[in-house]
Image: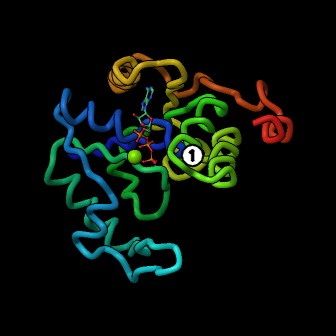
Amino acid sequence: MASILLITGTPGVGKTVLAQNLSRKSGFTLVELGNLVRKEGLYTRFDKARKTYIVDEGKLRKRLEMLSRSSERVVLPTHLIGRFLPKDSVKTALVLRLDPVVLYKRLRARGWTKRKAWENTEAEILDVCLQESRLLLGTRKVFEIDTTRKSAASVYKEALRVLSRRRTSRSRIVNWLARYDPVELERNL
Ligand SMILES: Nc1ncnc2c1ncn2[C@@H]1O[C@H](COP(=O)(O)OP(=O)(O)OP(=O)(O)O)[C@@H](O)[C@H]1O
Ligand SMILES: [Mg+2]
């Protein structure tokens, strides 16, 4: 049966690396949303100011539905959760988590401004991707993986564990707010 494995999480947590491993080692077809949208014209227009294409959600959803029918298993890494996702075809969503301090440093090392790095770090602290995934897909399909201090290989292994349902979706994996006060953290970073 057709299925999409969604890999989501705040920018910089390691979605692409995991999706590449799943594609190479487990035979998933890797779908890169940006490429798909650009190459196949699945946008309404180009936003010059933000230098991005504005996605045509209806067209993209239809295309993803088609893909999930034609290919046995699709892996889709994206930090965006939205109506463009054909939610019935998404069988599992993995939300990668990363300690906010590690994430902030990783984003700054990418050359992102303090402001942009902090905005995304704050989204990680507040569980934004997790909540959005649960809202769209329901709690049963959504699993968190804490990637902090884990190698790409062990994140991959943990993903396989979840896929074989050797772990339940309900267990709470991280609670950054219990560890960090966002106001304090922003001041000290
Ligand atoms: N488990 C890991 N341990 C250490 N570094 C990692 C790990 N996984 C990925 N990285 C590194 O972190 C950076 C971000 O990884 P990646 O591009 O996969 O993130 P992403 O979630 O796809 O980001 P974006 O949302 O911007 O596409 C890369 O430099 C990658 O090599
Ligand atoms: Mg990526």
Front residue of this view, candidates 152 and 88: 152
Residue 131 coordinates in the image, percent (x, y)? 61, 45
* Occupied quadrant, residue 188: top right
Residue 39 coordinates in the image, percent (x, y)? 22, 69
Question: Relative to 75, is 37 above or below?
Answer: below
Toward the left, the furthest residue is 70
Question: In what quadrant of the picture does the N terminus appear?
Answer: top left
Q: Quadrant of ligand 1?
A: top left
Residue displayed at 38% across by 24% down = 152
* Occupied quadrant, residue 182: top right
Left or right of residue 133: residue 42: left
Mark 1 residue crowding within 10 angstroms, few (<14) / some (14–19) / many (20+)? many
Number of marks drawn: 1
Cβ(mark 1) to ligand 1 < 8 Å?
no
Front residue of this view, candidates 98 and 158: 98
Tell me which amino acid carries mark 1.
Cys
Residue 104 coordinates in the image, percent (x, y)? 63, 38
* Residue that label 1 marks: 129
Question: Relative to 43, is 26 above or below?
Answer: above
